[in-house]
Image (spheres, helix red, strand yellow):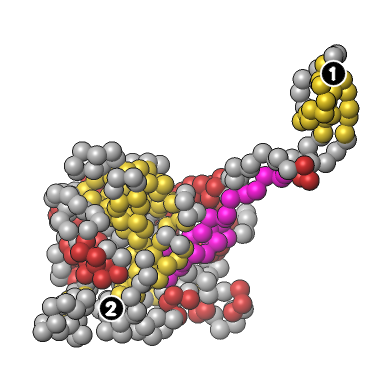
């Protein structure tokens, strides 16, 4: 589907990051600039759009809307629902399945601009790792941080996503379910309900807000101008030891995926065969070789054997990493290990830091190599961190010391 031309008055942008996945970015009043990912999944009987998060809930009048032109394709208001209708889902004909990577406001406030969740077509998935973090609604209101903004969290029915399960849509009209190639990975740490997902079809891994780089091509080149460098944020509810364990889990997952091989077709062409040729009469040896019949005779078929040199296995493409902010299509293994090294250096007190204003009653600090003017800029600045000091100090006590003191990525 061709995308419509960009609209400078629209607070959303969209581009393909692979042939079947879209990145939507939002220019919001809070300066979050969240990432929303969209993929159309289809079977023989139905299609769905899988969304990863829904953004901040921006809803602005469209200055290019003309009520005197009812045939105009421009919506009266720009929000994530109307933007999706304008770009990849005309008239919202395709139902949505929303994966919430966690419950913070900049990832869930767009839900109420989609069709309702108390009946089909919109389904909202959340991690089953910590259901009491999101339910009852009063906890969602608090843990989403909507209270800080004097906003109401959206109400939505939650479908709990089990670790390592696949995103599946059950047809409300009784048809066969549609199982996607998208697998859920529980990844608590940033919040207890944080999750990642992996799309086996596109080899794309999304880690939500567990980590992201300070800047990328997408954050530097936007319709609304270059965005400020971004810091990974840990909050009052973050548990660094859980974050560390989740990172190790995802690192191992990616290592396994990066060793997967493609299905190799049998070699059939003679020019692809090499090795010793052996002739014989009668029955050929039973195994180990490929046989070519030459002539038939009274004493049996005359045969020729050809050794085949098998082609080396072809690895599947390496996993790419995207995040809830900034990072898109980074090499997953390299990015994960670089972030682990950065956090290990923080635990070893090797990263320059400066104190910020207290947040939610917590002493809060900012870690960034670029604070130190003597830092080698070529080797620094890929990540930065804002976190309560208590979260870091508790991590030092709980994470096994040999995991962050004896090695460096």
State the residue lying farthest toward the top. 299
Q: Quadrant of the N terminus?
A: bottom left
Q: Which stretch is magenta? A: 311-336
Q: In which quarter of the image is the C terminus?
A: bottom right
Residue nearer the viewer, 363 or 51: 51
Q: How many labels were placed on the picture? A: 2
> Residue beneath label 2, please?
11
Residue 196 screen position, x and y as percent = 40, 53
Q: How far apart are marks 1 and 2 (CA)?
A: 81 Å
Question: Is 317 colored magenta in this rendering?
Answer: yes
Crowding at mark 2 (Cα within 10 Å: few <14, some 14-19, many 20+)? many
Residue nearer the viewer, 4 or 134: 4
State the residue lying farthest toward the left. 68
Residue 381 screen position, x and y as percent = 53, 75
Sooner in the amino-acid sequence: mark 1 or mark 2 = 2
Name the residue at 15% across, 70% down: 150
> Residue beneath label 1, please?
297
Crowding at mark 1 (Cα within 10 Å: few <14, some 14-19, many 20+)? few
């Amino acid at each position: 589907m061709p995308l419509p031309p960009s609209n400078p008055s629209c607070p959303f942008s969209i581009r393909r990051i692979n042939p079947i996945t879209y990145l939507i970015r939002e220019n919001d009043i809070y300066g979050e600039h969240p990432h929303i990912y969209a993929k159309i999944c289809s079977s023989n009987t139905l299609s769905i759009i899988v969304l990863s998060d829904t953004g901040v809930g921006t809803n602005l009048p469209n200055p290019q809307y003309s009520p005197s032109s009812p045939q105009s394709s421009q919506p009266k208001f720009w929000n994530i629902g109307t933007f999706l209708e304008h770009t990849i889902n005309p008239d919202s004909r395709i139902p949505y399945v929303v994966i919430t990577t966690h419950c913070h406001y900049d990832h869930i406030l767009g839900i109420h601009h989609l069709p309702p969740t108390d009946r089909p077509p919109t389904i909202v998935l959340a991690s089953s790792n910590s259901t009491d973090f999101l339910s009852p609604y009063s906890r969602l209101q608090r843990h989403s941080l909507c209270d800080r903004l004097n906003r109401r969290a959206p109400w939505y029915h939650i479908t709990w996503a089990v670790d390592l399960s696949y995103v599946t849509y059950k047809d409300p009209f009784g048809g066969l379910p549609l199982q996607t190639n998208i697998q859920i990975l529980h990844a608590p740490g940033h919040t207890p309900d944080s999750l990642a997902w992996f799309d086996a079809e596109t080899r794309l891994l999304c880690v939500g807000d567990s980590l992201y780089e300070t800047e990328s091509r997408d954050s530097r080149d936007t319709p609304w101008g270059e965005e400020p460098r971004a810091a990974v944020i840990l909050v009052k509810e973050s548990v660094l030891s859980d974050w560390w364990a989740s990172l190790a889990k995802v690192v191992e997952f990616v290592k396994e995926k990066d060793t997967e091989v493609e299905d190799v077709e049998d070699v059939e062409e003679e020019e692809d065969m090499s090795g010793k040729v052996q002739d014989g009469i009668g029955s050929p040896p039973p195994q180990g070789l490929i046989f070519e019949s030459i002539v038939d005779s009274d004493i049996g078929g005359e045969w020729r054997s050809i050794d085949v040199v098998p082609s080396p296995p072809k690895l599947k493409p390496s996993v790419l990493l995207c995040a809830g902010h900034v990072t898109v299509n980074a090499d997953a293994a390299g990015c994960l290990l670089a972030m682990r090294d950065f956090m290990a250096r923080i635990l070893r007190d090797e990263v320059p830091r400066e104190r910020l204003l207290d947040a939610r009653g917590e002493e809060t600090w900012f870690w960034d190599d670029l604070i130190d003017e003597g830092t080698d800029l070529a080797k620094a600045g890929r990540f930065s961190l804002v976190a309560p000091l208590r979260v870091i100090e508790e991590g030092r006590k709980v994470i096994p010391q040999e995991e962050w003191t004896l090695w460096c990525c």
